[in-house]
């Protein structure tokens, strides 16, 4: 069911790799709600992914950008305003990658070149995107910027590895930039702390299958899916949430406030 919540709104969506991506589902929902946007991803991901199919489906153009490169982001921001015919109302940062995770190095055996690269891609890129938007004065008043995070920023999940630190940094950037964006431009900045979700990035985490079923059993409402996350993001892009900013918003079926569930107790009582 669509409500036309984003009619007339324009934006940029980072991170749609394939049909499972949270950004892919979000692009579909934003399109359904009447928003128009430019899709972007790292040039290498575009060769591997299916972004052109999504572009066709949503009547969007694709502008490649490596989110660690300032010149790529500046170009993306300028081109997006040109393509969409004006300033932007929403931006989704849906980017994450850890080379330590990918190479199977544990938290106590990080290779710091990998750590630095993962931080740049997963965390600092959020600052780079916002700084570019800010300096270009590219956001309309009451615009909305959303980044995606995970609860490992607050609590330990051992195999989430250096991504936990990256997410803590990302959430802090949302708060700090949210202050300046709010004061100067009336733009809101939030992070959504999403349930484990079976995507390329999610499934890269060791023991993901156990992890996702544990979260499912712990959450009174069950895990939030990528489509649920897309719907929530639409509300944050809409005019119905204008005074929500500088928040880390848990979107996890209640997981973050559950100490233990009956299902988990039952597993240990046999
Ligand atoms: N899947 C989960 O369990 C889960 C849970 C909570 C939060 N998140 C977060 O959601 C976001 C989206 O991830 P997803 O689960 O949809 O996985 P995904 O693998 O579909 O998306 C990750 C995206 O990051 C992009 N990316 C990597 N390096 C880049 C770069 N240098 N420049 C631009 N883009 C780059 C990839 O190409 C890909 O499109 C990430 O921030 C992730 O950490 C995921």
Image: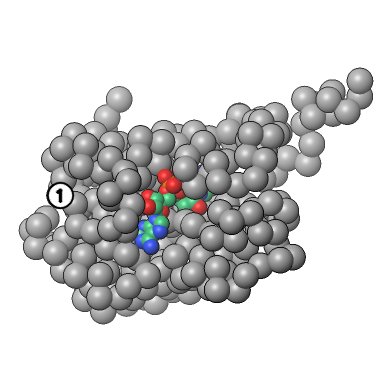
Q: Residue furthest front?
A: 103
Tally the marks. 1
**Picture quadrant where residue 21 is located:** top left
Circle 1 residues within 10 Å: few <14, some 14–19, many ≥20: some
Residue 17's x, y, as percent? Answer: 35, 45
**Picture quadrant where residue 169 is located:** bottom right
Q: Nearer the viewer, residue 122 or 248?
A: 122
Figure check: 85 above or below 261: below
Colour mode of the rendering: one colour
Asked whether the viewer can see residue 268, the reply is: yes
Q: Nearer the viewer, residue 161 or 263?
A: 161
Figure check: 67 above or below 29: below
Task: Give the residue at x 16% y 60%.
Answer: 80
In the image, is 199 to the left or to the right of 46? right
In the image, is 38 to the left or to the right of 116? left
Residue 24's x, y, as percent? Answer: 33, 41
- Note whether ligand 1 is within 8 Å of mark 1: no
Residue 232's x, y, as percent? Answer: 42, 41
Figure check: 227 above or below 100: above
Q: Residue furthest right?
A: 270
Task: Give the residue at x 53% y 38%.
Answer: 197
Say what secondary structure mark 1 lies in: strand
Task: Give the residue at x 25% y 70%.
Answer: 72
Q: Where is the C terminus found, in terms of image quarters?
A: top right
Task: Give the residue at x 41% y 72%.
Answer: 127
Asked whether the viewer can see residue 134, the reply is: no
**Picture quadrant where residue 257 is located:** top right
Figure check: 149 above or below 179: above
Please name the residue that numbered disc 1 is placed on: 61
Residue 29's x, y, as percent? Answer: 30, 36
Q: Where is the N terminus found, in terms of image quarters?
A: top left
């Amino acid at each position: 069911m669509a409500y036309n919540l984003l009619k007339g709104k324009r934006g940029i969506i980072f991170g749609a790799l394939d049909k499972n991506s949270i950004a892919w589902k979000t692009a579909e929902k934003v399109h359904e709600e009447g928003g128009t946007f430019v899709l972007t991803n790292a040039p290498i991901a575009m060769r591997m992914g299916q972004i052109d199919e999504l572009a066709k489906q949503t009547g969007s153009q694709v502008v490649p950008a490596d989110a660690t490169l300032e010149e790529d982001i500046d170009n993306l921001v300028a081109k997006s305003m040109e393509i969409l015919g004006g300033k932007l109302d929403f931006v989704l940062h849906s980017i994450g990658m850890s080379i330590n995770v990918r190479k199977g190095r544990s938290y106590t055996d990080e290779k710091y070149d990998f750590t630095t690269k993962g931080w740049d891609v997963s965390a600092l890129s959020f600052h780079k995107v916002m700084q570019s938007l800010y300096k270009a004065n590219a956001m309309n008043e009451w615009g909305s910027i959303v980044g995606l995070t995970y609860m490992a920023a607050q609590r330990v999940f051992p195999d989430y590895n250096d991504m936990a630190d990256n997410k803590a940094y990302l959430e802090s950037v949302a708060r700090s930039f949210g202050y300046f964006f709010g004061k100067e431009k009336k733009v809101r900045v939030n992070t959504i702390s999403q349930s484990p979700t079976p995507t390329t990035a999610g499934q890269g985490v060791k023991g993901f299958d156990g992890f996702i079923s544990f979260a499912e059993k712990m959450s009174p409402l069950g895990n939030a899916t990528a489509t649920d996350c897309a719907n929530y993001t639409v509300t944050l892009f809409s005019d119905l949430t204008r005074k929500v900013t500088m928040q880390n918003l848990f979107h996890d079926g209640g997981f973050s406030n559950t100490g233990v569930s009956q299902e988990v107790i039952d597993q240990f009582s046999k």
